[in-house]
Image: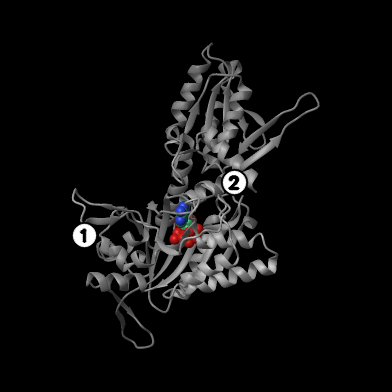
Amino acid sequence: NENKLQAIIAHAKEYGFVFPSSEIYDGLGAVYDYGQWGVELKRNVRDYWWRWMTQMNEQNIVGIDAAIFMHPTTWKASGHVDNFSDPMIDNKDSKKRYRVDHLIEGFAETLPQEQGDALIAEMEKLIAADDFAGLKTLIETNKIKCAVSGTVNWTDVRQFNLMFSTEVGSVAEESNTIYLRPETAQGIFVNFLNVQKTARMKIPFGIAQTGKAFRNEIVARGFIFRMREFEQMEMQFFVRPGTQKQWYEYWKEKRREWHSTLGVAADKYRFHDHVKLAHYADAACDIEYDFPMGFKELEGIHSRGDFDLTQHQLYSKKKMQYFDADIDPETGKAYGNYIPYVIETSIGLDRTILMLMSEAYTEEDLSTEEKQDSRVVMKFIPKLAPIKLAVLPLMKKDGLPEIARELMDECKQHFKCFYEEKDAIGKRYRRMDAIGTPFCVTIDHQSKEDQTVTIRYRDTMAQERVHISKVREIVQAAL
Ligand code: ATP
């Protein structure tokens, strides 16, 4: 619900997870900056995905880091120049621009169920047929109003390409126009043979990449759900033609397994199979998460056939073939040369962060008969939490900071720690709860006598006295 999203946005800002971009200038639409704890959370998720793909996976997967700028022909070949667009319409009075599907869907929600469904079905038919005049008529006959000015004064519907463009070098010539990549996948496709040859990869194998992508989203809503600058984590898995169905099922299951290790309740996920497929795809599904705004796409898994490599072969005139020396049992001969088929898994890092924050965010009422009390705690699993351990001397004197510093120096070699000696201990605990630190350790006078400290567990708030030499082990065991 809207309230929960607002609470998460406010919390993210107050505790240094996510700030609006260039906030002192009133921000920039759908662009955000990650603060001191957000960046740690994001790194942890990215690193975990990376290790899971390139190190822990039973399949043969290596990574690359391709440039954001690519030769302009890349985007001709991939279809983005011609097809990566949404139908838009402007309201002449308010000068507001709308995505046609969002405008009509928003209106359909105000209608009785059956009528709304019929309208959406009609819209989908028109969009599939690129019938822009029909879409405009649909908007006009339903007298759909502009949310801002309340008028029905619309321009024609037209396509709006979502790629950002800029110029290379100083002269603005048509040929100098390049794009900010709208997805990371193409960097993998154009390097397919470089990687295959230099790493001597045998099919089936994968190439993974994480990095920024840019889309000039018209309707940017839902905080870091839909951004103009965002980060993707993509893996393209190259397989022998004819085996794609089995690999598609394999990756659906594997990705489900990955998600099951993030501390997110299984019933908050669902798989949504695409009914309408791109002409080249033979299967596609989304993994959806129940965000505060409802179930929405988090990750896509697509069986893309040989579309991408074939297109690049066509446009670059370079062979994109692989030689398969394995013997085909049916013919008794090697499989030989072919363009591999591709299974893609593509997940938004920022959407994953929004999921983890939505899942972790917990308001707890701690009131007793004597007093009202509450806390907000971010229940991240320890391996993803921005800080693993807070070291908190009870007082700034009597040698307690020295003991604390010594513990810090030992632990910070192994995981992210945080040191703080200001404020009442209760207040310090609450701040650590708010950023999701799973363990706090307090050093008091007894610590000087018997080398024990108090360890406090975030979720239960239980406290326990342990020998100082045990602290590192306890935290590491949880990671
Ligand atoms: P949507 O339908 O929500 O626009 P999409 O189907 O266009 O998404 P893909 O092109 O399949 O998305 O991109 C793969 C993943 O990248 C998505 O599942 C999503 O997690 C992420 N992603 C796409 N667009 C954005 C965006 N504007 N902001 C943040 N993440 C995004």
Element type where label 1 sits in the image: helix
Task: Please state which of residues 114 and 142 is positioned toward the viewer in this rendering.
Answer: 142
How far from the left and from the top, in percent, is residue 27?
A: 45, 38
Element type where label 2 sits in the image: helix
148 over 87 or under it: above or below:
above
310 over 40 or under it: above or below:
below
- Res 327 → quadrant: bottom left
How far from the left and from the top, in percent, is residue 138?
A: 55, 68
261 over 329 or under it: above or below:
above
How far from the left and from the top, in percent, is residue 153?
A: 52, 58
- Give the class, few, some or many, for how many residues have Cα within 10 Å of label 1's Cα (few <14, many ≥20): few
- View extreme (top): residue: 398
The reply to whether callout 1 and callout 2 are in contact (CB within 8 Å) is: no
> What residue lies at 65% left-to-right and 40% top-to-bottom?
362
241 over 197 or under it: above or below:
below
| Separation of marks 1 and 2 at Cα, in angstroms | 45 Å
The residue where tag 1 is placed is 175
Task: Please state which of residues 415 and 277 is positioned toward the viewer in this rendering.
Answer: 277
Nearer the N terminus, badge 1 or badge 2?
A: 1
- Give the class, few, some or many, for how many residues have Cα within 10 Å of label 2's Cα (few <14, many ≥20): many
In the rendered structure, find residue 358 and report the number of the disc placed on it: 2
- View extreme (bottom): residue: 331
Residue 353 visible here: yes
What amino acid is labelled 2 in the image? Ser
How far from the left and from the top, in percent, is residue 96?
A: 48, 52
> What residue lies at 43% left-to-right and 34% top-to-bottom?
25
Q: Is mark 2 within 8 Å of ligand 1?
A: no
